[in-house]
Amino acid sequence: MPIARVALPVAAATAFDYWWPEGLTIARGSLVCVALASRKLVGVVVGVANESDVERAKLAPILDVLSEPRVPEDVLDLAAFVAEYYQEPPGLAHALAVPPLTKRRAPREAQAVAVEGYNPALNAAQAAAAEAISAAEGFAPFLLHGVTGSGKTAVYLTAADRVLAAGRQALMLVPEINLTPQLVARVRAARPGLRVAVLHSALSAGERHAAWHAAASGDAQIVLGTRLAVFAPLPALGLVVVDEEHDASYKQQDNIRYHARDAAIWRAHRRRVPIVLGSATPSLESWLAAREGRYRRLDLPERADPRATLPAVRLAPHRAAAASDGVGERLRAGIAERLARGEQSLVFVNRRGFAPSLVCVACKWEAQCTRCSARLTTHRVPPSLRCHHCGHVEPLPRACPSCGNVDLLPLGLGTQRLERALAAAFPGARIARVDRDSTRGKHAFAEVRDRVEANAIDILVGTQMLAKGHDFPRITLVGILGADNALYSADFRATERLAALLVQVAGRSGRAGAPGEVIVQTDFPEHAVYAALAEHDYARIADALLAEREAAQLPPYAHAALLAAEAHHRADVDAFLGAAHAMGAALAKVHRGVDIFSPVPALLARRAGYERGQLVVQSARRAALHRFLPAWRAEIATIPGRRARWSIDVDPAGFG
C-alpha cells in the first residue's frame, strides 16, 4: 500500500503518514488535502514509501491532490534545512514553501515611483564588481560593500544580465516591503520589458498565488521580495541577491525563527549559483567571512552619480542651551538654509510618539504599563498613553494618579514632538512624519514618498523606516537626534546596529548634485562610532567591534542558541528554566565544547502579562552546538507539569 509522508502546518515533530487511493498521482512535493482529527488541512508530501510504522487501521486516506505545481526539490530541501537548523517543527517550515491556495489573480502593477537621477551606466568600480560576479561559476559568495548611493542595484542588474540572457532566473531579496516599489521601478527603468514578480506579505492571497506561479513556471525572470521570497520556486535559478544584507528584518522573530539571508546562502550553495550580499554597513558575520576569505569582498568606494559626494558630517552638542524641544541651534540653522534654497531636509529620531515617558514633577510618579515592565509612551495624535511592546492604550491622565498634581511632564523626544517643534520653528514649511503610526494605511508610505519625489515636502521627520535604502535626491541635510540612547543598551549587538543605522540615515543626504550635510546631536562626540561616521570609515568600526566580540567570545566568534520562556507567574518561568538548565548541563558533559549559562530574566522581564526569562547555550564550534540542540530539545519536551511557553532561537538577533 503506497504511503505518503505529509508535512502539515502544525507544531508536530514529524510528518504524518497517509495512504492514497487508486487513481491519485502523488510524488514528493505534491500538495494534498488531508484530515487531521476534525480539521482538513493542506500539506506537502515530503516522502513516499511502501510501508508505515503506523498500523493500517489507524491510517487515514489522502482526500485530494491539488492541481498546483509541485514544490520543487530544492525548496523542500530548504524547508527541511530550516526545520533542522533552527530547531523548528518541519510542518511549519514546509508551510513557508506552500503558495496561498486561492483563485489566481493577476498581480497589480507596482505603484509608479520616480527614479530621477538613476543612471544605469557603470563607473570603473561598479563594472569590475559586476564582471567578477558574472564570471563566477557555481556557488560563489560575494560581499558587495558599497558606500550609500554607490549604485549597488546597477551592479546587481548588470551581473544578472548574463544569467537572464541564458534563460535563467534571479532572486532579489530586500528587507522591507516599503523598499519593493522603488526597486521594482529601478529594475524596470534600467531593463524595460523584464518580467518581474513581487512576493511579500502585504500582497493579497491572489496576488501572491499569481507571483508564485510566475516564479514556478519560469515566466518571471526576476523574483523580488522580502524574506518569504527565499522560498519561491525558481526552476532556473542562476543568481541570488540579498540587498541590505545587514538588516535585522531578515531575521524572523516569531513562529519559524529563521534568517532569510542565511537561508539564501544555503539555497545558493544547494543550487550551485553565485550569491551577492550587498550593504554599505555589512553585518559583522559577513564582514568576518570576507576578512577570512570565505566571501569575496567587492568595494564600491564612490557614489554612482558623478555629481554626488559623501556628505560632510558634523557633531553638535545634544544638550545645548539654545535647543528647543531637542532641536539644537545648528540644526535649526541648517534647515533654514535648505528652506531658503528650496532643498529638502530629513530629521531622524528613532522613537515614535510624542515623548518616551510621562512623569509627575511633584512626586516623581511615572506612567508604567500594567502588563509590561516598561514605561508608557505619551502620544498626542490621538491623545493617549501607549505601550509599544504589548499595544496597551489608556487615556492621558488629567492629574497624577499618585498625588493629584496636575503638572505632568512628558520627558524625551519622539517623532510627534519633533514634528510639532519643527512646525513651530518653521511655520511655512511642509512637514511630513514617517513612522509606524503615520503609515498604517496600505498606501500611506507610498503617498509620502511620492510627495517627496514631487518636491511637495520640505522636511521629513521619521524613524528608521527612512533609513533603509530610500533614494531622495533633493535631500541635502540630515539631522540625527537621540542616537546616544543606543549606547546605554545591554544588547551586545547595540553598537553594531547603531553604527549601521547612523551610516544608513546619513547616506540619505547629498545623493545628487547638491552637496550634503549631516548634523548629529550627541553628548559623546569622541565615541568611536561617531568618529568613524565623520570619516565615512565603516571598516574601522567593524574591525574594532570584531576585536571586542573576539575578546568576549561572542558571535560571530561563537555560535549561540537562546531558550526563552514565559508564563503568568515568575515561579513557573524559574522552575521551567531551572529544569532545562539542569538537563542542558548534564548533556553538556557528553556533548563537549558546549557551554550553558544560568537562567536570567529577559531584558524586558514582563510583557503583555507574561513573566519572561531566558538562558543561552554557546559553542565555539557550530557542529558541536547542533549536535547538542536536538537532544536538549527532546529532553525539554519531557519536563513534567510545565506551565511555561517556550521556544529555542538559534543564532538569535540579540540576548534580549
Image (cartoon, helix red, strand yellow):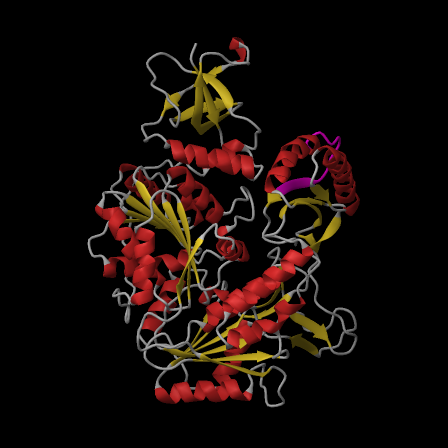
Residue 156 x %, y %: 33, 56
Quarter of the image for the N terminus: give it: top left
Residue 260 x %, y %: 47, 47
The span picked out in magenta is 637-648
Compare residues 408 and 93 and report the one nearer the observer: 93
Residue 405 falls inside the magenta stretch: no
Q: Quadrant of residue 529?
A: bottom right
Q: In which quarter of the image is residue 21?
A: top left
Quarter of the image for the C terminus: give it: bottom right
Seen in the picture, residue 647 relative to 2 is either above or below; the reply is: below
Residue 143 x %, y %: 43, 56
Compare residues 578 and 356 and report the one nearer the observer: 578
Seen in the picture, residue 232 relative to 298 is either above or below; the reply is: above
Identity of the residue furthest to the front in this view: 293
Seen in the picture, residue 64 relative to 410 is either above or below; the reply is: above
Q: Can residue 434 be seen in this view?
A: no
Left or right: 48 in relation to 88: left
Compare residues 370 and 597 and report the one nearer the observer: 597
Q: Main secondary structure of the magenta part?
A: loop
The tally of labels here is 0
Compare residues 14 and 191 and report the one nearer the observer: 191
Point 31% across, 78% down: residue: 307
